[in-house]
């Protein structure tokens, strides 16, 4: 109970919308703005050795501001719990979306895959590799936009993307051959393989490499051989072949992917991977509303906000900004 007091002061917690390994996710309402959020709740004792993964995820999300990456609004840590207040994605997981439809058309797959390419290119550009790309980690918001989640395994090698990574991680069915071979591997190259598995899942509704026996699964991945159902177009087959290249050095790169003929087909333009969010400059309307509401000067409020503490102020700022971009009034309802 006292664990929740801290969070309950500003949020009305609603139903559980997901529960994974060591986290439970609940829908909640941010009381000062009325906006809906998702709160990921973790128990530090239950986390055990996985606690560093949560710290990794929090630090990464603080630096990743992109319209196809789930936004972190606030972090609350009590003696026993960690609460991450995140962007709510009412459409749930892409995984369930595909299962409900058996498989997606090439046109719908292209629309989603371009968003994934946008998010992953942005991450790679900032020196991060996700390393756990799969449909369960892609959520759909209320405008059919994909939002990438779960940065617990992402890596930002010290020496930039050229640094090799060693830890084996992620979900086996999406893992690149070089990763399961235990060799050193490049995070961005492994992400490209996983994107190939993702594209295959979008277009077919099942996985290219699958087996209940982990040894058999690894053999299939290393073989690089997968079925090619007759509904796949020749262009789709070509792109899959370029992504699911067993040799990482022969695999397509994100730069080649951005304006690939399959990616631009009927869209006419390459993938725009730059973030639409402008976080370096504070929004005037939001600063005004917050400074008036807290009865402080704009300068004081700006100075507080620019600390980016990911506290109630950061959450109120981002959620007011979200209201503004969605065309809703930039108003705070109660004392912060
Ligand atoms: O919003 C989330 N999940 C969510 C929201 C709504 C629904 C679901 C998940 C699944 N059932 C349909 C409704 C969510 C957001 C961030 C996150 F890290 C994890 C989960």
Image (tube, helix red, strand yellow):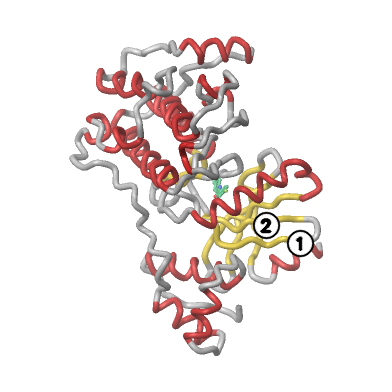
CA neighbours of label 1 inside 10 A, class few (<14), some (14 to 19), many (20+):
some
Vertical arrangement, residue 137 with respect to residue 303, above or below: above
Q: Is mark 1 within 8 Å of ligand 1?
A: no
Q: Is residue 162 left or right of residue 236?
A: right
Q: Quadrant of residue 152?
A: top right
Spatial distance from mark 1 to mark 2, Cα to Cα? 8 Å
Q: Is residue 211 above or below residue 76?
A: above
Give the crowd class for mark 2: few <14, some 14-19, many >=20 residues within 10 Å. many
Residue at the disc numbered 1:
78
Tell me: 203 left or right of 223: left
| Secondary structure category for the residue under label 1 | loop
In the rendered structure, find residue 83 and report the number of the disc placed on it: 2
Residue 214, by quadrant, is: top right
Q: Any mark on residue 296, and which?
A: none
The numbered mark, 1 or 2, whose residue comes first in the sequence reads 1
Percent position (x, y) of residue 303?
52, 79
């Amino acid at each position: 109970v006292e664990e929740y007091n801290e969070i309950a002061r500003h949020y009305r917690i609603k139903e559980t919308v997901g529960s994974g390994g060591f986290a439970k996710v609940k829908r909640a309402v941010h009381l000062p703005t009325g906006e809906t959020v998702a709160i990921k709740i973790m128990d530090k004792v239950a986390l055990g050795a996985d606690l560093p993964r949560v710290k990794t995820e929090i630090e990464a999300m603080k630096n990743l501001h992109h319209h196809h990456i789930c936004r972190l609004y606030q972090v609350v840590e009590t003696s026993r719990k960690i609460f991450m207040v995140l962007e709510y994605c009412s459409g749930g997981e892409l995984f369930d979306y595909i299962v409900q439809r058996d498989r997606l058309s090439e046109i719908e797959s292209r629309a989603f895959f371009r968003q994934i390419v946008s998010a992953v290119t942005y991450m790679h550009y900032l020196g991060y590799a996700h390393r756990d790309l799969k449909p369960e980690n892609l959520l759909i918001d209320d405008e059919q936009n994909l939002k990438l989640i779960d940065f617990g395994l992402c890596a930002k090698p010290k020496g930039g993307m050229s640094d090799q990574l060693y830890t084996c991680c992620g979900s086996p069915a999406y893992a690149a051959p070089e990763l399961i071979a235990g060799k050193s591997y490049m995070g961005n190259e492994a992400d490209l393989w996983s994107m190939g598995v993702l594209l295959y899942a979008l277009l077919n509704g099942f996985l290219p490499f699958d087996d209940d026996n982990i040894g058999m699964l690894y053999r299939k991945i290393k073989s690089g051989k997968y079925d090619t159902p007759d509904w796949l177009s020749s262009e789709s087959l070509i792109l899959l072949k370029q992504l699911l290249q067993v040799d990482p050095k022969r695999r397509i790169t994100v730069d080649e992917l951005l304006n690939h003929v399959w990616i631009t087909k009927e869209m006419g333009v390459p993938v725009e991977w730059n973030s639409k969010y402008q976080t370096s400059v504070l929004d005037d309307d939001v600063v005004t509303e917050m400074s008036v509401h807290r009865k402080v000067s704009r300068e004081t409020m700006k100075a507080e906000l620019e600390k980016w503490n990911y506290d109630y102020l950061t959450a109120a700022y981002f959620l007011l900004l979200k209201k503004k971009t969605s065309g809703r009034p930039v108003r705070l309802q109660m004392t912060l």
